[in-house]
Image (spheres, helix red, strand yellow):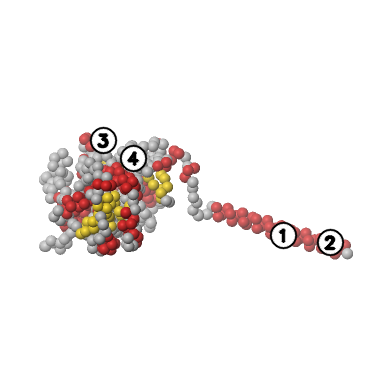
Amino acid sequence: MADKNAHYTVLISRRWILILFTMTSSVFIFSWFCVLRSTSGRPHFIDHRSLPNSMNFATVDNGDLNAKDQNEGQALLAIPLEHVGDHGNTPKVKDVNCSSKKTVLKVFMYDLPPEFHFGLLDWKAPEGGSVWPDMQSKIPSYPGGLNLQHSIEYWLTLDLLSSTMPDFKDSRSAVRVFNSSEADVIFAPFFSSLCYNRFSKVRPPQKRSRNKLLQEKLVSFLTSQEEWKRSGGRDHVVLAHHPNSMLDARTKLWPAILILSDFGRYPPNIANVEKDVIAPYKHVIKTFENDSSGFDDRPTLLYFQGAIYRKDGGFARQELFYLLKDEKDVHFSFGSVQGDGIRKATQGMHSSKFCLNIAGDTPSSNRLFDAIASHCVPVIISDEIELPYEDVLDYSEFCVFVRTSDALRKKFLIRLIRGITKEEWTQKWNKLKEIERFFEFQYPSRENDAVHMIWQAIARKVPSVQLKLHQARRFARYNMGKQSRSGPEPWPKHFW
């Protein structure tokens, strides 16, 4: 009997030891699971309010974050955290001060032959002289009409040429340097939009157009330069503002920072908002100077005048024409710049409360910038549109955005517009008068005009470019022998 009790006691003890071991093991495994889960590559949300206040500001100095400026609240490219508020789920910049302390962008500009730039304006370089016009004498003028809307290349080149002149040093946003190793970016002064507008047709006895030939020459020149080879073209600035300009060269010069009007005719691996800069059109109607007209002084509620039947994404124009043509206080008609078209459009926009900006052949059109110059609140119906300087400018403060699918619903758009109060419209109208200077092209350029804003937008791309270049050079020493045998090391697959 005693032996049986002893045996029973041993069995009970072993069972409890097994249970204890199982529980301990389970706790141990669960603990390690929690540790591994917390250290895995899963995303975590950081409360930015806990970050030091000293990080509220930063400036770009030659492409690098300048730590000594981080505590200085009036820096270019800086947005104070207290100026960022909630607008739904989207951060909103409430105040943009572009006139405070800024870093001047250093730009090296190639001395391309005149056939690439002012020669396209019929300017003749003096024999044995400079490839550039004398900026202190007569400057070649740019052709008018619709040519002007894509003239960005002209204004940026003029600004660089004058940047070293003593009279313009105080107001410059970019300065030309003559040593490429000192530059933040490398500028290629090809008037590509003008070249497309004037020379895209083949003229006998030519077999190819002048536009195609100049693109080929440009590609050959740029890709043979040490500056291009040094960066793979990532720090170069190439202008292609007209949607059809640089059609042949864009697939070869894609690594550069492209200055565009939109991405409508570009695949995302060639152009995208992370890499490139969207620049405004130059408005073709007259600026509404000394505008004192209020809500009740503008009799037309909603205005559109332009091409109605468009291809690609512009189908909405035709649909909206049939929806709105009979509405009271709405002007929706065909129009062009021919004859008296610009004067009539100026008069119509200056006397309208809201101006429609509908996608055409591409997501953007000059009509948005004509509306801004007219202080006519833009109504943007273009789902794929990208807007200039939108990283520092909140367009919802002076525009009305409507999805295309909503705009094409019967009575939706007109009810939406009629429902906007006088007070809300007046707020947007006042904001238009405040920001219109950001879209003005002129020579000489002025503080916070379109030329300055574009240079600043380019400057904001510099840190990203330098980051990618530095990352690509990590194994340069290791790959030196390989490069000498088989040519340059290819860039990372997903460089952007």
Q: Secondary structure at mark 2?
A: helix
Mark 2 lies on residue = 6
Q: Nearer the viewer, mark 1 or mark 3?
A: 3
Residue 213's tag is none
Q: Which mark is residue 170?
A: 3
Quadrant occupied by the C terminus: bottom left
In-front residue for pair 342/491: 342
Under tag 1, what secondary structure? helix
Q: Which residue is mark 1?
A: 19
In which quarter of the view is residue 69 placed? top left
Q: Quadrant of the N terminus?
A: bottom right
The quadrant in which residue 401 appears is bottom left
Q: N-terminal of the two: label 4 or label 3?
A: 4
Q: Could you give the CA–CA distance between mark 1 and mark 3, rounded to whole angstroms?
A: 82 Å
Residue type, mark 4 in image? Asn
Marks 3/2: CA–CA distance: 101 Å
Tally of numbered discs: 4
The residue under label 4 is 97
Label 2 sits on what residue type?
Answer: Ala
Q: Amino acid at mark 3?
A: Asp
Q: Earlier in the sequence, mark 4 or mark 1?
A: 1
Q: Quadrant of residue 208?
A: bottom left
Disc nearer the start of the sequence (3/2): 2
